[in-house]
Amino acid sequence: MRNWPQESKQALRLLAAARYFLPEALDCPADLERGYHTALRLGECPAALDALEQIGYLHSGHETEAHFWKELYYAAQQMGLPEHALRYQEQIRIISAMLRMQG
């Protein structure tokens, strides 16, 4: 059994939480989802984050989308990836604005 550093454990939890907020059945290329799972198993959190980001863009408009991007934002912060965090923060802002317009 692998002895994961605490930072990796936290990042893995946040990535799993983000995946939870996507639709259960994903409508994306199988290799993209496979890449996410492989990266998780190998502890390659930034690669898993990138795969989830791509999957997230393919699943816009679902009811828990804002929660998905928030978890990705937290994961990016945890991993020390500020450029990623800014992208996810922008997605959250866009979704919030759309929800306000819908009323």
Image (tube, helix red, strand yellow):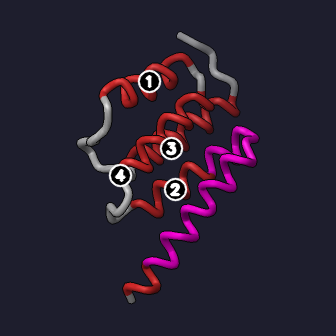
Question: Element type at marker 1?
Answer: helix
> What is the C-alpha distance between the residues marked 4 and 1?
17 Å
Q: Quadrant of residue 30?
A: top left
Looking at the picture, which amino acid does disc 4 mark? His
Spot occupied by residue 22 in the image (x, y as percentages of width and height)? 36, 50
Dot 4 or dot 2: first in sequence order is 4
Question: Element type at marker 2?
Answer: helix
Q: Name the residue tied to disc 2.
A: 69
Dot 4 or dot 1: first in sequence order is 1
Residue 59 numbered tag: 4
Question: Element type at marker 3?
Answer: helix
Q: Is residue 5 left or right of residue 63?
A: right
Q: Name the residue tied to disc 1.
A: 35
Question: Element type at marker 4?
Answer: loop
Badge 2: residue crowd in 10 Å (few <14, some 14–19, many ≥20): many
Looking at the picture, which amino acid does disc 1 mark? Gly
Q: Which residues are magenta?
A: 74-98
Badge 4: residue crowd in 10 Å (few <14, some 14–19, many ≥20): some
